[in-house]
Amino acid sequence: MVMVDRFSKACKLIPLKGTPTAMQTADAMFQQVFRNFCLPEDIVSDRGSQFTSRVWRSLCEWLSIDISLSSGYHPQSNGQAKRLNQEIGRTTRNLKLKLPCCKLSPKFIGPFEIVHQVNPVCYRLRLPASYRICPIFHMSLLKPAHSPGIGDSDLVDPPPPLDIDGSPAYRVHALLDSRGVRSRLQYLVDWEGYGPKQHSCVDAADILDLSLTEDFHRDHPDKATPRPRGRPQRRTPGDVPGGGSVTLYPRIPLN
């Protein structure tokens, strides 16, 4: 159950086993909300059965709390709670992968082993320790993994990531291209064990094996290269683009 204080914007997330009854909702409000935020003047909620019951209405009337129910098919009436629900759903969903663009990140990663079924709609997965997220996912975020050996190389299980200082890392098979983006150099990487769909651009600083970049620029001298360190060489007054020299005369002031 998600609670948001309209004044301080503080949130309260109360774990419950299934949809609570009116009495369970009232008890959770007393134990988790009222004791921390005091009695509210008004409670905005959806039209769930626990908020439209006589028990809930009698309790709020006894505590002098106004009840504001959201309109049908108009979630904006309770926009703060709905917005918080989006943020909560975006955290067991968005993994902190080292990718240059979140919009181009893969829709699914894995496969991962199912440890057991928590409830009819949620499953616990066996995730690497470096992910540091809750391993329980709703079935809407999961899809079956294809079995290898059916003729599609993209369906073969990819190798697990390496663990470098507690962060996942992947082996580079080859560098395919380079480009300059806002004074930064990026490489198009072919990851070892992954298909063409997983090719992605990464910063040059993230390529740990320098021999890969040296071999790439030796074989592709026309591609974008890293800038040399230090300031560019300054031209002397006598240098002329294209060769040759000129003589500079001092300016004589006119009286």
Image (cartoon, rainbow, N blue to C red):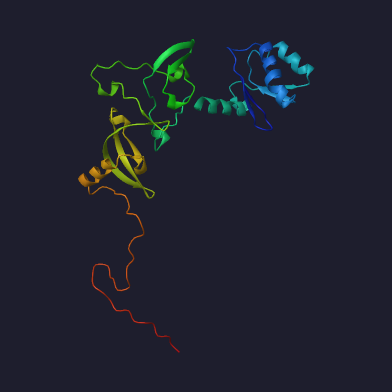
Q: Where is residue 203 in the image (x, y as percent from the top left)?
A: 36, 42
Instruction: Determine whether 43 is above or below 56 in the image.
Output: below
Query: Where does residue 143 sit, x and y in percent of width and height?
Result: 39, 18
For the question of whether residue 51 can be seen, the reply is no
What residue is rendered at 42% in x and 34% in y?
102
Return the residue nearer the eye: 151 or 184: 184
User: For this rendering, which residue is in front, 68 or 97?
Assistant: 97
As drawn, is 23 to the left or to the right of 249?
Answer: right
**Is 231 in front, or is 75?**
231
25 over 3 or under it: above or below = above
Q: Residue furthest bottom?
A: 255
> Measuring 75% from the left and 15% from the top, which residue is drawn there?
59
- In this view, the residue farthest toward the left is 219
Establish if 208 lies above or below 239: above
Q: Where is residue 178 in the image (x, y as percent from the top left)?
A: 29, 44
Q: Is residue 195 above or below residue 201?
A: above
Question: Quarter-wise, where is residue 153 in the image?
Answer: top left
* Quadrant of the snapshot with the C terminus: bottom left
Question: In screen coordinates, is 193 left or right of 71?
Answer: left
The picture places residue 121, in percent across and down from the top left corner, at: 48, 13
Q: Which residue lies furthest to the front in this view?
A: 165
* Res 238 → quadrant: bottom left
